[in-house]
Each structure stands twice: as C-alpha cells, then as structure tokens.
Image (tube, rainbow, N blue to C red):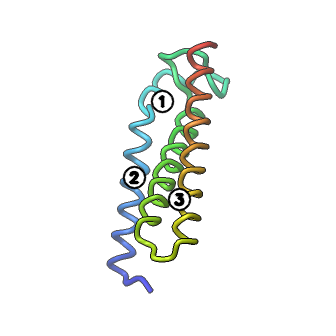
C-alpha cells in the first residue's frame, strides 16, 4: 500500500508529466492559433487545434508506456514474461508511431 507521502509524490509526478507533454505537444500554439477553428485537424504545419494537442499527448504517453514495458522486460526472470513484455512494448510503440506519422501526413499533405 502506498503511504500518504508517496501518493503525493506520484500525483506530483503525473501532473508534471502531463504538463510537460502538453507544452511539448504545442499547447500554447493550439490556444493562440487553433482556438478559433472548428476542425479537429487543420492541414497546416503552423496551426494546431486543442484536439490535436490532446491526441499528441496521448501518443506521448503511449510511447512512454511502451518504453516502460520494454524496460520491465529486461528486469523479469522468466522467458515467457520477457517475450510478452517485449511484444507488448514494441506493439504499443508501433501503434503510437503509426498514429503520430498519420497526423504528420495529414498536416503536411493536407
């Protein structure tokens, strides 16, 4: 069971990651430029919407989770769990990359 101080540390860590990923994915640009648009994805590289920012934050968390699964695969002792965590980690990373590159393709090609 988590103690009360470790709960606060966990909450602060998650809040920091959410804020960092939000700013890294273009939160300020989406607030300034994309707030006037009704589209979900604007086919322009200079304008971003709030929806795009949320999707990119989810993609970043998916990538972090996939990397965490890969990290844990190196720490396990049984071969079956190693292969399961490796397969899961690479699957999650692949899905995150495919979704991310799909958004980039829509933004560049219009």
Q: Mark 3 points at which residue?
A: 86
Residue depth check, mark 3 versus mark 2: number of the one nearer the observer: 3
Q: Is mark 1 on a helix, strand or loop?
A: helix
Dot placed on the residue nearer the N-terminal end, 2 or 1: 2
Dot placed on the residue nearer the N-terminal end, 3 or 2: 2
Q: Mark 1 points at which residue?
A: 31
Q: Rounded to the nearest whole Å, what is the CA distance between mark 3 and mark 2? A: 24 Å
For residue 55, above or below residue 30:
below
Q: How crowded is mark 2: few (under 14 residues within 10 Å), some or many (20 or more)?
A: some
Q: Residue at x 52, y 24 (%)?
A: 48
For residue 62, above or below residue 31:
below
State left or right for residue 75 relative to residue 62: left
Q: Residues within 10 Å of mark 3 (few under 14, many from 20)?
A: some
Q: Rounded to the nearest whole Å, what is the CA distance between mark 2 and mark 1? A: 19 Å
Q: Residue at x 41, y 70 (%)?
A: 75
State left or right for residue 12 relative to residue 93: left
Dot placed on the residue nearer the N-terminal end, 1 or 3: 1
In the rendered image, which quarter contains the N terminus?
Answer: bottom left
Q: Name the disc covering residue 17, or none.
A: 2
Question: Residue pushed farthest right?
Answer: 39
Residue depth check, mark 2 versus mark 1: number of the one nearer the observer: 2
For residue 57, above or below residue 103:
below
Q: Which residue is drawn at 53% across and 59% down?
A: 86
State left or right for residue 88 relative to residue 64: right
State left or right for residue 35 relative to residue 12: right
Residue depth check, mark 1 versus mark 3: number of the one nearer the observer: 3
Q: Is mark 2 on a helix, strand or loop?
A: helix
Place residue 76 in its image quadrant: bottom left
Q: Nearer the viewer, residue 33 or 61?
A: 61
């Amino acid at each position: 069971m988590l103690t009360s101080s470790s709960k606060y540390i966990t909450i602060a860590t998650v809040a920091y990651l959410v804020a960092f990923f939000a700013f890294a994915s273009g939160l300020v640009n989406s607030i300034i430029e994309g707030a006037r648009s009704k589209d979900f994805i604007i086919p322009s590289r200079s304008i971003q919407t709030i929806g795009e920012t949320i999707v990119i934050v989810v993609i970043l968390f998916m990538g972090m989770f996939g990397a965490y699964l890969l990290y844990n695969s190196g720490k396990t002792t049984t071969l079956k769990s190693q292969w399961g965590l490796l397969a899961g980690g690479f699957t999650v990373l692949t899905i995150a990359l495919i979704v991310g590159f799909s958004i980039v393709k829509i933004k560049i090609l219009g």
